Image: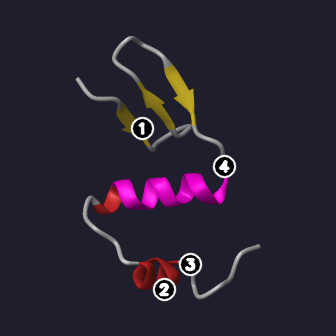
Amino acid sequence: MPPRLYLLDEPHVQEEGGCRLELAPARPTYLLVYLACRGEWVSREALAGASGGRGPA
C-alpha cells in the first residue's frame, strides 16, 4: 500500500509500516497539499494565480 496523506487535524503522511511523518506549516507543505487535492497536472501559471499573485515572502 502506498503512503497516505492526511490533511485533517495535523497534516501528516502515514507510511505502511506505521511511521508517521508530520508536515510542517510552511509554503512547501501548502504546495504539496494543494497539488495532492488537485490530483492532476498544475501549471506554474495556475499556481501563481492560486497564491494571489504574491511573490516569495
* Badge 3 amino acid: Ser
Q: Quadrant of the C terminus?
A: bottom right
Above-or-below relation of 47 to 52? above
* Residue 26 pos. (x, y %): 67, 54
Instruction: Check disc 2 and report the residue beneath it.
Output: 49
Above-or-below relation of 36 to 54? above
Circle 1 or circle 3, nearest the eye: 3
Q: Is residue 8 magenta?
A: no
Q: Secondary structure at mark 1?
A: strand
Alpha carbon separation for disc pair 1 and 2: 25 Å
Precedes in sequence: disc 1 or disc 4: 1
Above-or-below relation of 33 to 47? above
* Badge 4 amino acid: Pro
Quarter where residue 38 is shown: bottom left
Instruction: Check disc 3 and report the residue beneath it.
Output: 51
Q: Tell me what residue is drawn at x 34 percent, y 57 percent.
A: 37
| Residue at the extreme front | 44
Instruction: Check disc 1 and report the residue beneath it.
Output: 6
Residue range corresponding to the magenta coloring: 26-36
Q: Secondary structure at mark 3?
A: loop
| Residue at the extreme right | 57
